[in-house]
Amino acid sequence: MNNIRNFCILAHVDHGKSTLADRFLETTGTVLLSSIVPQFLDSNPISRERGITIKLAPVRMNCKGYIFNLIDTPGHVDFSYEVSRSLAACEGALLIVDATQGIQAQTLAYFDKAKNQGLKILPVVNKIDLPASQPEETALSLINSFGFAPDDILFVSAKTGEGMEELIAAIIKKIPPPSGQDKLTRALVFDSLYDPHKGVIIYVRIIDGKIEKNSGLKLMATNTDFYPVDIGYFVPEPKSVECLETGAVGFIATGLKDIRLARVGDTVVFSSQMGETAPLVGYQQPKPMVFVGLYPTDQAAFNDLADALGKLRLNDASFGYQPESSLALGKGFRVGFLGPLHAEVITQRLEREFNLELISTAANVEYQAIIRGSKVDIQNVSQVPEDCREIFEPVMQGTILTPAEYLGPILELAKKKRGSLLEMEYLDRQVKLVYELPLAEIISNFFPLLKSASSGFASFNYELIGFRKFDGVKLDILIGGIQVDALSKIVSRNQAYLQGRELVERLSGQIPKQMFEFAIQASIRGKIISRITKKSWRKDVTAKLYGGDQSRKDKLLDKQKKGKKRMKAVGKVYIPQEAFLAVLKNS
């Protein structure tokens, strides 16, 4: 154990985590230089397309007689749960800061997470090879902001490999080895995936004891016994071994076919030691904050979607789902995510990895409402009754770091998004702003607007602090006198008229004419606030007449009016799926 070093890489987006992992693989000889491609550990195609890490990736390396267990982590706030799981499997963390950008919002957030976990943190200034880099100023910011000593700061270039020898020496010297006991066996499950041949594969950190291939094991949370089909390390491809010892990071192929039996945060023990072993602390279950409806374009694929969601949730425990149905879209699922980017990535993975064709509705947040004297969580706006008088919305504490020259536009943007300024602090080259912001405003184009206001230099991180009462109302849409629940939404009272009119106009442009006249209306508590009457198709019933008395034409026109009136009474407005989706996506 004295020769084992378990550590992860933490950084803001695009500060060089994955590139630094590449240099570790190259420097330690784990992967041949000819085989290394940029961001080698980002094997997911979506991750490569977007240029961001979306999944943690463990790898075992041999370096100068030591074993390095490295976990590469995502940097975006929507995937912070992946970081939390990685920290629990490590004794140390490399905190990477871009020498051209300095400390960013996620740098602050991840430093606090690692510190609270009790990890040894090594500050690393990256990208020192770039002409625009300012390594001395960045180091000074780390010293002033986090209290590091000047001798603690390490300078590297993940691109060229400069400074790697000094970094490896610091890891060996400063990051403590793992500790554990031999009498009992306990392993923490920090990730998992499903394999059609080996069943559920769990990623584990051996906390105490050792696990051999022929061991009888048990998952404590579900009280499930199993014998491993395979055990091993990631180098970075899975490599089978006979034994995983204390401090090791590896995998166990359980052979279990029921994905519900293996949970992230569970404890693996010997079946014979079940009564005398206490479970590990595990992880706090993340709370989904952004909700999207996912529906198969072909309703026959509903069961396939349910199976895909179950298997994907095994690999990403941070989202939840429950079935729901819509008059317009049929049967589907209401899926909760940690943020809008998380929702996009999971939807893409479902479509690509499971060959599904999906329809996704507009993202909304979870509200709370007082219904019959009780506070109820509302994930679907259609659940809010018209007479509801009290609505609470989720509020986030957001941290913005920006160069001082962009302060004015950002303050104006935050004001438009109903933000309340809590704190303003000047940090060397940047200004730190702390706001209270409604989550509904954050998921509504806040990130692109922030980048536009700051020319791409500002960074943003947020976390839930609770629910706050706000002056909101339920906006309902009626088409042909029938309320369409899937188009209902909660809006601020002072924006209700504008949003209602905009939605009615958009629907009018998307829904084709029918054989009868019908109205598209927006209402609040039964009061119509906007209306557009969609005219019917008109057939020239008098075209066959050649002159004659006007009364003959009038008779035909009166007959047509009566027919349309009768059809309007019994007819149903047809809303094409394409029009319905265009409205939902654009909202």
Image (tube, rainbow, N blue to C red):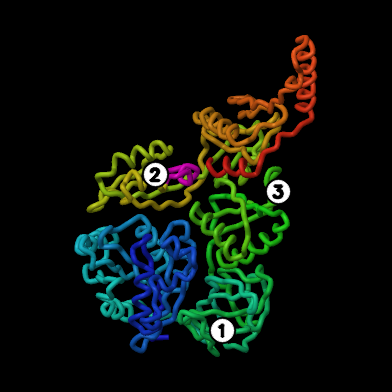
Amino acid bearing label 2: Leu
> In what element is the residue under mark 3?
strand
Q: Is residue 405 above or below residue 563?
A: below
What's drawn in magenta, residue-wise? 436-446
User: Given the current orientation, which residue lies at the most extreme front position?
Assistant: 546
> In what element is the residue under mark 1?
strand
* Neighbours of disc 3 within 10 Å: few (<14), some (14-19), many (20+): some
State which tag comes first along the sequence, 3 or 2: 3
Residue 532 x/y as whole percent: 61, 26
Asked if marks 1 and 3 touch (Cβ < 8 Å), the reply is no
Q: Is residue 377 visible?
A: no
State which tag comes first along the sequence, 2 or 1: 1
Q: Residue at x 50, y 52 (%)?
A: 340
* Neighbours of disc 2 within 10 Å: few (<14), some (14-19), many (20+): some
- On residue 231, the disc is 1
Q: Which residue is mark 3?
A: 330
- On residue 451, the disc is none
Q: Which residue is mark 2?
A: 449
The residue nearer to you, when weighing 122 against 337, is 337
The residue nearer to you, when weighing 498 against 184, is 498
